[in-house]
Image: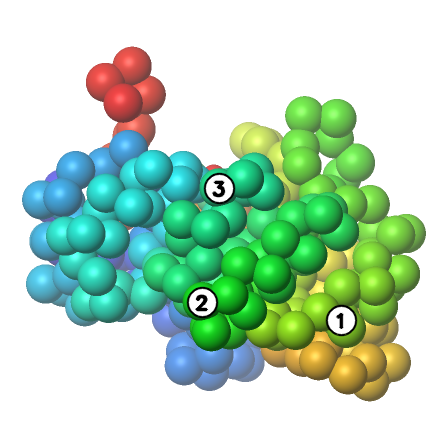
Amino acid sequence: MSIKDNLDVVTDKINRACKKANRNLEDITLIAVTKTKPIEDMEAALEYGVLNVGENKVQEIRDKYEVFENKFKWHMIGHLQTNKVKYIVDKVDFIHSVDSIKLAKMISKEASKKGCEVNILVQINIAEEDSKYGISQSDAEEFIRDISILPNIKIRGLMTVAPYVDDPEDNRLVFRKLREICVDIKQKNIDNVYMDVLSMGMTNDYEVAIEEGSTMVRIGTAIFGKRNYAKG
Ligand SMILES: *Cc1c(COP(=O)(O)O)cnc(C)c1O
């Protein structure tokens, strides 16, 4: 299967999940997760209409940004170290993985220096897995209140990485929970807190995530095939 064929299949499934859930296709942003994938794959994705790409390494964003610049919107979806924020803050449209006050402050500081504004999502570890980054759901509101006062960042919503499961139905309640937290916090009408974005759903479970209200799906394998980490 070519990248084009894969994109057709994914788009079709997104479409069907939207119909099933009575949602509009325009409300879903497809983020093609290009981590570890070569420039040629990204060129193909661009050619077939992909506008948003997700990466999880700062160096990889820097290298690929040099090639594509603003032909894509860039999404940082991986764990981000504070000392590396400065390299990407003026390149990315969204940072999905904000999980500490220290990180939020650094993003705000570096964005202020560069005179840009960054959309951020707060990563929540719904399943409370030790192996995952993210703050616990019980801390979410206080965390968001604390960072909402920082300049040059916009708190757009929440992100989660659901557990790896064989049956995507097993993640339905994880996605539902994330949406509930989002709706709850939105209702508090906190300044600078928009809660219009829910980043949830990957290759294995994006259809269920869309049925449960996802607005950004992060899809790698279904578009580009398996990743080969040994090769880098
Ligand atoms: C790698 C990655 C994805 C994409 O995973 P696939 O299963 O290949 O679709 C999505 N989100 C995050 C945070 C990732 O690191």
Q: How far is the residue under mark 3 from the one under mark 2?
A: 14 Å
Quadrant location of residue 144?
Answer: bottom right
Crowd band around label 1 with a 10 angstrom C-alpha radius: few (<14), some (14–19), many (20+): some
Quadrant location of residue 80?
Answer: top right
Tag on residue 84? 3
Image marks 3 and 1: residues in contact by CB distance under 8 Å = no
Tag 1 residue: 148
Residue 23, above or below 231? below
Tag 2 residue: 114
The furthest residue to the top: 230
Could you tell me which secondary element the residue under label 2 belongs to? helix
Amino acid type at mark 2: Lys
Mark 3 or 2, closer to the camera: 2
Residue under the point 47% across and 79% down:
27
Q: Horizontally, is 218 left or right of 64 in the view?
A: right
Of 170 and 48, the residue lying toward us: 48
Q: How far is the residue under mark 2 from the one under mark 1?
A: 19 Å
Quadrant into which the N terminus falls: top left
Using the rendered image of the protein, determine whether residue 172 is visible from the camera's viewpoint.
no
Label 3 within 8 A of ligand 1 by Cβ: no
Q: How far is the residue under mark 3 from the one under mark 1?
A: 22 Å
Crowd band around label 3 with a 10 angstrom C-alpha radius: few (<14), some (14–19), many (20+): some
Using the rendered image of the protein, determine whether residue 48 is visible from the camera's viewpoint.
yes
Could you tell me which secondary element the residue under label 1 belongs to? loop
Amino acid type at mark 1: Ser
**Residue 38 place in picture, x, y as percent:** 16, 38
Residue 228, above or below 171? above
